[in-house]
Image (cartoon, grey):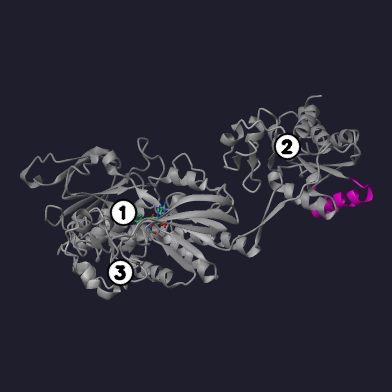
Amino acid sequence: MKGNGNHNARIGVYVCHCGTNIAGKVDVNALAEYAGKLPGVIVSREYKYMCSDPGQELIVKDVKDLKLNRVVVASCSPHLHELTFRKTTANAGQNPYLFHMVNLREHVSWVSEDPIAATEKSKALVKAAVLRAVWHEELEPRRFPVNPNVLIVGGGIAGIHAALTLASAGKQVYLVEREPSIGGHMAQFDKTFPTLDCAACILTPKMTAVKQSSNIHLYSLSEVSEVSGFVGNFKVKVKKYPRYIDEAKCVGCGECIEECVYKEGKYPNEFDLGLGKRKPIYMSFPQAVPSIPLIDSATCIEFKSHKCPKGCVEKCGDRNAIDFTQKVEEVELEVGTIIMATGFKTFDPRRLPQYGYGKFPNVYTSLEIERLVNASGPTLGQVILRDGRRPESIGILHCIGSRDENTNKYCSRVCCMYSLKLAHLLKEKTGAHLYNFYIDMRTPGKGFEEFYKRVLDEGVSFIRGKVAEVSGWAQSPAEEGKMILRVEDTLLGIIRRIPVDMVVLSTGLEPQADQQEVRRLFNLGCSAEGWFLERHPKLAPVDTFTDGIFLAGCNQGPKDIPDTVAQAGAAAAQCMAHIDKGFVEMEPNTAWIDEELCSGCHVCIGMCPYSAIHFDTEKKVAVLNEALCKGCGSCVAACPSGSAQQNLFRDEQLFAEVEGVLV
Ligand SMILES: Cc1cc2nc3c(=O)[nH]c(=O)nc-3n(C[C@H](O)[C@H](O)[C@H](O)COP(=O)(O)OP(=O)(O)OC[C@H]3O[C@@H](n4cnc5c(N)ncnc54)[C@H](O)[C@@H]3O)c2cc1C
């Protein structure tokens, strides 16, 4: 058992007015007088703002002059000023963990009606603090060195930007991307709102810079399979799936693709969402990075029957880059910090059959339209319907899978703007009449409202109403071959029937399908909607609850490219702060396990949300890794033998505190 309590405690109590925040409700003079009579209290004072410089100097002077060995400050939330006062006592030469704080503001004055009851409650809390402080003991924060290497998971624009930022500061980055190329969703777009920048023109220089940087080690077709360790010292296993082309030997000439036994594409190209065809040996898109083809073993004749003439191998010649024997490889990396940049998936509109996706060939998702209008897309930018016609009328349906009680309640933030972009591009390319069906137009960004106005001026129609159904019920020869949209126009208050040739579903953004598995792998939290959870929505938006792991981009929630890039920069800055400091310091409020008392029941292991406890099979006891422990106390509460204890929350400290409140 650690610590026996200091029965020669010399305690100073300091009651803060916090202006009128506390003093307006609690009788601070009576409280200070009461505290002065508690056992072990040498001095008790009240002061207007204890956190001010004069307030802190008061404490320092008393500690020195009166030889105090414990300090209790009764003021606001420890979240705000515990660190301030720990530093104050440390400046006075005292171990900062001999200090204790009482929250009179949030726990008493702000939540009490009656001043007398508030003062009595304050007395009980101060007494509890004084009794517990006697049992405080000197503790030291723990220090661990930080490995300067960074892992980034996901090579969309978020991962790319974070990688380049870190690399430009001289840091070594491992960028793990599970697709054959980096680029993410942005690589699929033709133009980007609201400026209509060509997506490839602004993205591909960054993709190329990733490849050219000697500080970035790119693992494409790869996924993280195991993560252990803690901030500053993570060990990561990466599974690298076979490309069947040796990346070190291939020069990306693409001649192997030409020589494939299939002269035309035969299988749906995943990058084009099945709108175009590819061969079994292919490059997902022309600007792919790495600029190296891959072979799909599921469709390649050589893998299926070993009867392929292998024109690809012959063409590659002495370079000998094609390797049908490649297997999954496992790579082990050691990094100090991690950035999660795994992005999003789009809502699957088959979940809403009333919109006819998969039933009517000319119903498309917004992402499919991105490929269709793209100059390097499957139709080279020509908008031709699946039945070969050119559309004369197009309906764009907003909020598919967003702002809907039956699917996702949240707004996907980018759909109004990308719908405007697609309306503009479709109008430009087809001259068709465009209808946008919206619930509310949400355009709160730089240049967004102006872009909305521009699209209005271009003659695009906007109908406020949610389309109830897409059907094929033509009522006149003119409607033959068209789809009929039924919608309540909520501005005119009428039901409308609008025949169109093409329907575009503006599908919302959702967490990745494997978001929960990835969450478990990296020990992250998720919001109710399934997005990765940031530590604080306002003050720590890129931090997670696992120290050293940061978030960037759409895995934390829907956002556009500028916000994604800003967040990626912030995540990179957080990594650099750790690296440049060189070490991490951790609070000593961790749990510990008394091996003598541990019965080896395993209960604590299952309770620990941070995987900080393992079982020592030789000693047959639970062993806690202090570096991983966050001091949540779950193991301490669950331990039936009382062998798990926690610094700053030891049984004696808690019992003394309870006694102070009750007796
Ligand atoms: C139809 C549509 C149009 C849009 N148009 C615009 C626009 O014009 N302007 C604009 O500002 N925004 C637009 N957006 C929003 C834009 O797509 C996002 O802001 C941006 O793509 C977010 O980038 P990201 O890197 O966070 O995610 P993503 O682009 O989704 O990239 C994530 C990357 O991580 C990889 N990955 C995922 N999981 C793993 C894993 N476990 N291991 C390894 N790699 C993994 C993925 O393969 C992918 O490469 C649009 C969105 C949609 C749906």
Q: Is residue 543 left or right of residue 341?
A: right
Q: Amino acid at mark 1?
A: Ser
**Which residue corresponds to the image point at 74% horizontal and 40% vertical from the top-left?**
648
Question: Is label 2's Cβ within 8 Å of ligand 1?
Answer: no
Q: Which residue is mark 1?
A: 419
Nearer mark to the viewer, of 1 and 3:
3
Q: CA distance from mark 2 to mark 1?
A: 55 Å
Q: Secondary structure at mark 2?
A: loop
Q: Amino acid at mark 2?
A: Phe
Q: Residues within 10 Å of mark 1 (few under 14, many from 20)?
A: many
Q: Main secondary structure of the magenta part?
A: helix
Residue furthest bottom as drawn: 318
Q: Which residue is mark 3?
A: 321
Disc 1 or 3, which lies upstream in sequence? 3
**Which residue corresponds to the image point at 70% horizontal and 37% vertical from the top-left?**
595
Region rendered in magenta: 50-68
- Quarter-of-image position of residue 43: top right
Q: Amino acid at mark 3?
A: Ala
Q: Residues within 10 Å of mark 3 (few under 14, many from 20)?
A: some
Q: Which residue is mark 2?
A: 649
Q: Is residue 212 above or below residue 555?
A: below
Question: Is label 3's Cβ within 8 Å of ligand 1?
Answer: no
